[in-house]
């Protein structure tokens, strides 16, 4: 039966907004009878997506949710933990598509990243799996970037050092970063306007601003602009953060690799807006020639591209400034490392609100609609 009745929860949040934009850009609303739900704005008009939709429903009204064939939630993990069990307990058999991490590691759900694990998704649909969850942004972007190496089975282990954008902490995180930049810029304005002011004077002023009480840090708990934060999410037992743990846990679940590949590193928040970057140290299983590696990386999927390892190409194509707002996943700085011929280095950038969040959700909805014809 064609999937038409699709409920959207969390549609006005950051991931939900990007999802709506992408669905509009791709003409995905055609043929849908969407219903939009809210935890706070029940009864207000639905967003205009070009097809009719009733006023906003109550996101906690189980009977109304249960009328949907598919529910797409970008509302957050607490919402998922509360509502999904109630729906299932009531016998709801629909598809649950989720941005939150709550159900990612459960046996009855698949982490979706179809350019990488389409086979796995197709098998799961055939087997009747009803829960499809987008992966952690950093993990999804890593797998998109290094897709070719994993496909070939060349990776023995890898370490990823990340440079993660403010958007990973939600809309308030993005706002706070720019507010911090404003405080620093305003404080330094006089010195910047004075061509005789020394760089050391400017530095002293900036340091004072960054450490001062005037810098807003409610969201990140520390300065991010003109600084960085080497801690993302909660602590885990082994000393890693939950964000760092996800590379191994979610990465191997997406790859569905029989023998888990060791993946670990440090996740660091930096002052980019919505692109995560990552530097990889990859231990290959053998000494694969560099030109072969480059070819495999470049051809792995439609979104990854190889950036030549030179300064001009790197500055032009391999930065958050170049990639933000696009689906491109450039991989560059590819070279053999001094540790030996089977050690590879690479650097990649990706928009964490697109491939890292909204795009896999948009695509799994399309895949499910295709399957159900
Ligand atoms: P968000 O922007 O905080 O939005 C979540 C909900 O907050 C909205 O749906 C809305 O629900 C409510 N809300 C309250 N005030 C709002 C306002 N002024 N503007 C918009 N919404 C407001 O959350 P998010 O960053 O999109 O994340 C949603 C889920 O996706 C989370 O589980 C997150 O972990 C996951 N995720 C996020 C990212 C990311 O990069 N941010 C990446 C991957 C996965 P009501 O309409 O019900 O009030």
Image: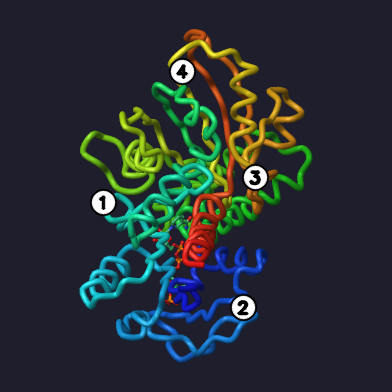
Residue 23 in picture, x, y percent from top left: 60, 66
* Secondary structure of residue under mark 4: strand
- Which of pointers 1 and 2 indicates the residue nearer the eye? 1
Q: Earlier in the sequence, mark 3 or mark 4?
A: 4
Q: Say which residue label 4 marks.
A: 284
Disc 3 target residue: 328
The foreground one among 338 and 365 is: 365
Question: Which is more N-terminal, label 4 or label 1?
Answer: 1
Please indicate whether residue 327 sits to the left or right of residue 315 in the image: left
Quadrant assignment, res 243: top left
Q: Residues within 10 Å of mark 3 (few under 14, many from 20)?
A: many
Q: Locate ligand 1 by image quadrant.
A: bottom left
**Badge 1 density bin: few <14, some 14–19, many ≥20, Cα 10 Å:** few
Residue at 48% from the left image edge and 80% from the top image edge: 36
Circle 2 Cα neighbour tier, 10 Å, few/some/many (<14 / 14–19 / ≥20): some
Q: Secondary structure at mark 1?
A: loop
Query: Is disc 4 surrounded by few (<14), some (14 to 19) or many (20+) residues within 10 Å?
Result: some
* C-alpha span from label 2 to label 4: 47 Å
Between 225 and 346, the residue placed more toward the observer is: 346
Residue 49: which disc?
2
């Amino acid at each position: 039966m064609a999937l038409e009745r699709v409920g959207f929860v969390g549609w006005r949040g950051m991931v939900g907004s990007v999802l709506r934009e992408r669905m509009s850009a791709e003409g995905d609303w055609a043929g849908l009878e969407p219903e939009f739900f809210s935890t706070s704005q029940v009864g207000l008009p639905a967003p205009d997506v070009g097809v009719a939709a009733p006023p906003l429903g109550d996101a906690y009204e189980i009977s109304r949710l249960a009328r949907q064939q598919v529910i797409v939630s970008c509302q957050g993990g607490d919402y998922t933990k509360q509502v999904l069990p109630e729906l299932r307990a009531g016998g709801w058999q629909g598809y649950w598509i989720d941005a939150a991490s709550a159900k990612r590691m459960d046996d009855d759900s698949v982490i979706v990243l179809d350019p990488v694990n389409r086979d796995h998704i197709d098998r799961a649909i055939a087997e009747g799996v009803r829960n499809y969850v987008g992966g952690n942004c950093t993990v999804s972007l890593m797998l998109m970037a290094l897709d070719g190496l994993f496909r070939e089975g060349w990776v023995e282990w890898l370490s990823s050092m990340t440079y993660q954008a403010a958007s990973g902490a939600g809309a308030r995180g993005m706002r706070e970063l720019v507010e911090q930049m404003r405080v620093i810029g305003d404080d330094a304005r006089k010195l910047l306007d004075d061509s005789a002011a020394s760089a050391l004077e400017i530095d002293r002023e900036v340091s004072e601003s960054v450490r001062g009480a005037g810098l807003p840090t409610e969201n990140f708990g520390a300065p991010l602009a003109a600084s960085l934060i080497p801690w993302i999410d909660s602590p885990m037992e082994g000393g890693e953060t939950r964000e760092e743990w996800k590379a191994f846990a979610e990465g191997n679940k997406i790859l569905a690799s029989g023998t888990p590949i060791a993946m670990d590193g440090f996740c660091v928040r930096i002052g980019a807006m919505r692109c995560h970057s990552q530097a990889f140290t990859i231990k290959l299983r053998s000494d694969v020639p560099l030109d072969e590696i480059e070819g495999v990386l470049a051809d792995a999927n439609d979104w990854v591209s190889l950036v030549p390892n030179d300064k001009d190409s790197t500055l032009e194509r391999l930065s958050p400034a170049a990639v933000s707002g696009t689906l491109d996943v450039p991989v560059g700085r590819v070279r053999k490392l001094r540790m030996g011929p089977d050690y590879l280095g690479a650097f990649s950038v990706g928009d964490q609100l697109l491939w890292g969040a909204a795009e896999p959700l948009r695509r799994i909805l399309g895949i499910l609609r295709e399957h159900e014809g």
